[in-house]
Image: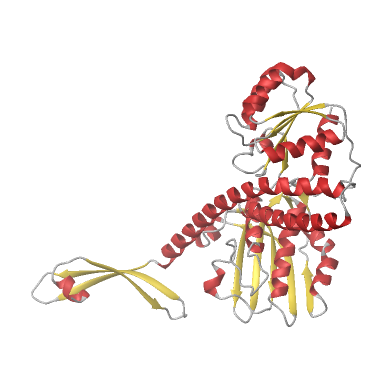
Amino acid sequence: RSITQQTLAGEATNFEWRYVGADGSEIIAEVTLQALRGNEQRLRATVIDITERRKLEAQLMQAQKMESVGQLAGGIAHDFNNLLQGILGFSDLLLENPDSTDTQRHQLRHIHNAATRAATLTHQLLAFSRRQVLNKKPVDINKLIESSGEMVKRLFGSHIRFDFIPGRDLGTVYSDPVQLEQIMLNLFLNARDAMPTGGVLTVETENVLITDEFCATHPWARPGRYVLTSISDNGKGIESSILDHIFEPFFTTKEAGGSGLGLAMVYGIVKQHDGMIQAYSEPGLGTTFKVYLPLYERPATAVGPKIAEPIEGGRETILVAEDNPAILELAKIVLEQVGYQVITATDGQQAVDIYRSQGDDIDLLLLDVIMPIKGGKQAYEEIQDLNADVRALFSSGYSTSGIHTNFVLTEGLQLIQKPYTPSALLRQVRNLLDQE
């Protein structure tokens, strides 16, 4: 039966009606039909515009989807980092072994390079899931973009013009400058790929105030003061059906060679900085990415390049607790090669028992965060009851902002993220042992 006949027969009728408004936009209406009493067959229609409600519901579902995918991505990255730790670590040791032949070293470099590329992908997954290690400090975005200008021009070539419009009296942001550069570089490269025959990339910075009124019509926004960086190209643009998915991991519009993780990584880093990112595009006209980072009230400090210090060993004793046999063996070899005495444990409870009997001889703990029976955090807390001044370095395939490892930041502790190189481990161990 038709809707009209159903309603006249006394059945409640409710349905959605989609139509195109005068301005060309789609309008979603909720329509309720009721039969009026009387001899004449008449209907009363109540029409409610629910377009904004449907948009809000879609945005909420997308946010929940991104959160779920982020948790999955973080778990996968953690497991892969544990596997890559053994591959990278042992290939490093073999490359440094004087008994390795030139042919073996050549093959080992292939193994090492492949594992390094895989580690880069897991770091991108961790960035998307907001589980990257961040080293935050006050940053002047104008100076950061200016300092990377020459590199950007080399990447673009002569067929793309780079225009930078720095905001006057621009506020600073509290961020990790390395990760911030990664955001900019990914968005710049995205713009370059959108302009294969040439064009203009425009980068503009400004201070903005997002009000409650703005948030009422833009559900993704949060009120506050922000530094806004807009990255615009006049390339081919992005179809609206694709635009909603560009920040999802492994979603790519590139024909070949794209991992689909670049914009997902950008999204994760921005979110980890308590920021917001939005994309606007018109096919054939170009695309604009707007990155909002919270304003930091204190002045920015200049950050100079770090000079690598020579790696030193020592004679101290280190208790290493790690449930992965390959990683445990690797850590033991690396530390003993430079003179350290190493005691090993395969879980947190064993580490506590060893410290209880040999604690006077142990100078440092190297604890994996996730272990059977008792994890690194629980083991550390119990050992602290025996010695409140015990020094500890945690290791994990997650990073400090993951659900398993955020205690490292909140308690002012140190973590080395897997997969780490032997030199990175030795440097961090030495720094901890040398602290007053």
Query: At which x and y percent is residue 79?
Result: 62, 47
Query: Is 271 placed left or right of 38 in the picture?
Result: right
Residue 396, located in which quarter of the rendered image? Answer: top right
Query: Is 422 placed left or right of 22 in the picture?
Result: right
Query: At which x and y percent is residue 174?
Result: 73, 49
Query: At which x and y percent is residue 50?
Result: 38, 66
Instruction: Name the residue located 77 percent from the left edge and 53 percent from the top edge.
Output: 177
Is residue 107 or residue 47 the one in the foreground? 107
Residue 332, located in which quarter of the rendered image? Answer: top right
Report the label total. 0
Q: Is residue 312 above or below residue 189?
A: above
Query: At which x and y percent is residue 241?
Result: 52, 73
Instruction: Name the residue located 70 percent from the left edge and 40 percent from the top edge.
Output: 326
Residue reaching furthest to the left: 39
Quadrant of the image containing the N terminus: bottom left
Asked if one can make out residue 225 in the rendered structure from this viewpoint, the answer is no
Q: Is residue 392 above or below residue 226?
A: above
Asked if one can make out residue 295 in the rendered structure from this viewpoint, the answer is yes
Is residue 430 or residue 301 the one in the foreground? 430
Residue 37, located in which quarter of the rendered image? Answer: bottom left
Quadrant of the image containing the C terminus: top right
Is residue 183 or residue 353 the one in the foreground? 353
Query: Is 154 placed left or right of 176 in the picture?
Result: right
Q: Is residue 262 above or below residue 306?
A: below
